[in-house]
Amino acid sequence: MIARKVIVFIMLLMVCKGASAGEYEPQSVVDYLIHGGHMAKPDGNQWQVALVESGRTHLDGIFCSGTLINNKWVLTAAHCLMDPLDCEKPRAGWFWVLYGSTDLVVSAKLVAPKNTVINPNYRCKPSRDDIALIELEEPVSDVGYVILADALTESKLIAPEQALLISGWGKTAIGNPVSRYLMEAEIKVVKNSLCEKAVGLSDKLPSNVICAGGGGKDSCKGDSGGPLYVRGGSKITQVGVVSFGRGCGEGPGVYTGVSAYMDWISKIAVTSVSSRCTAKDIRELRC
């Protein structure tokens, strides 16, 4: 069994190609049989959504992930809403937001996007401010929402070697199919200076990103826009959004830290629901 795992891991390294700064291979939690992850509990991640291309099956059409921050808005990565072949152009074609199930085939519900808002400072080469919001056509119910970490909370959660969680339906390796079931893995925070070398970046990473992963655990193609988070009982605190990395499991991944965007998020995603909502309201699930 050990020999088989080693062979499969070597094959993964051969298949997964590197990505330079700003390249956005929509980033899966790698195969739990190989890299130590596990299937998420069916009732544990109802706040996570999949973005699925219209006209395709859920398994064939998923291209990114996101999280519900309230009943009308989804947080995701900006590059998820851009053209896969030209990251400076908006994505063409319709898509659906799939929610309410960790299984892409059974029990999942669909809601249409009403509006998309890409952070005005977003740049794809090199990747900067990779964060966006999706307004839903209708409010969703019977699902949970994430709590977004403020600066103080984030600073406590992103110390080097701090354990965090990632989850997604993305590919277990480039060239593999996506996962029908939501997968989850524990990864550790890496210093940005070490991350720059591991990912092969020529420029320094900005201070508003988080580097985490390594040791074969990573996000991969199909997981972009998904969460980097901690779980405290039923409470989910999200600290980052999957942005980019080098291949699958070849090194740490880079995540957009959410705390730097709390004012931007609250102005767009909360005031449209209630003018009395604040960033603190988002964190405490009052909106």
Image (cartoon, rainbow, N blue to C red):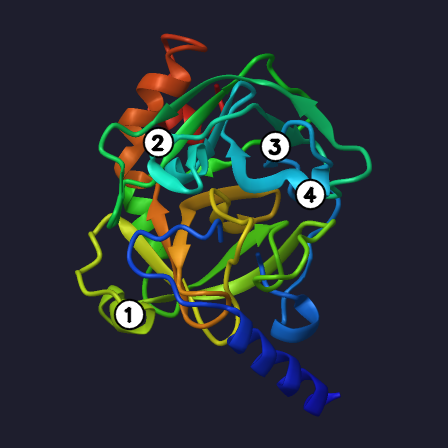
Indicate the position of residue 25 as horizontal and vertical percent values.
Answer: 45, 53
Which residue is rendered at x = 64% and y = 27% of the image?
Answer: 54
Q: CA distance from mark 1 to mark 3?
A: 32 Å
* Residue 149 visible (yes or no): no
User: Judging from the image, what secondary structure is the residue with disc 4 in?
Assistant: helix
Give the class, few, some or many, for how many residues have Cα within 10 Å of label 2's Cα (few <14, many ≥20).
few
Give the class, few, some or many, for how many residues have Cα within 10 Å of label 3's Cα (few <14, many ≥20).
some
Q: Which residue is mark 3?
A: 53
Task: Give the amino acid type for the residue marked by disc 2 in the picture.
Answer: Lys
Please identify the residue farthest to the front as the structure is shown: 85
Task: Give the amino acid type for the residue marked by disc 4 in the picture.
Answer: Asp
Q: Are the residues tagged 4 and 2 within 8 Å (C-beta)?
A: no
Quarter of the image where one finds residue 139: top right
Q: Which residue is mark 1?
A: 200
Q: Which residue is mark 4?
A: 60
Task: Give the amino acid type for the residue marked by disc 1 in the picture.
Answer: Gly
Please identify the residue farthest to the bottom as the structure is shown: 3
Q: Identify the disc placed on residue 89.
A: 2
- Could you tell which of marks 1 and 2 lies nearer the N-terminus? 2
Disc nearest the viewer among 1 and 3: 3
Q: Identify the disc placed on residue 61.
A: none
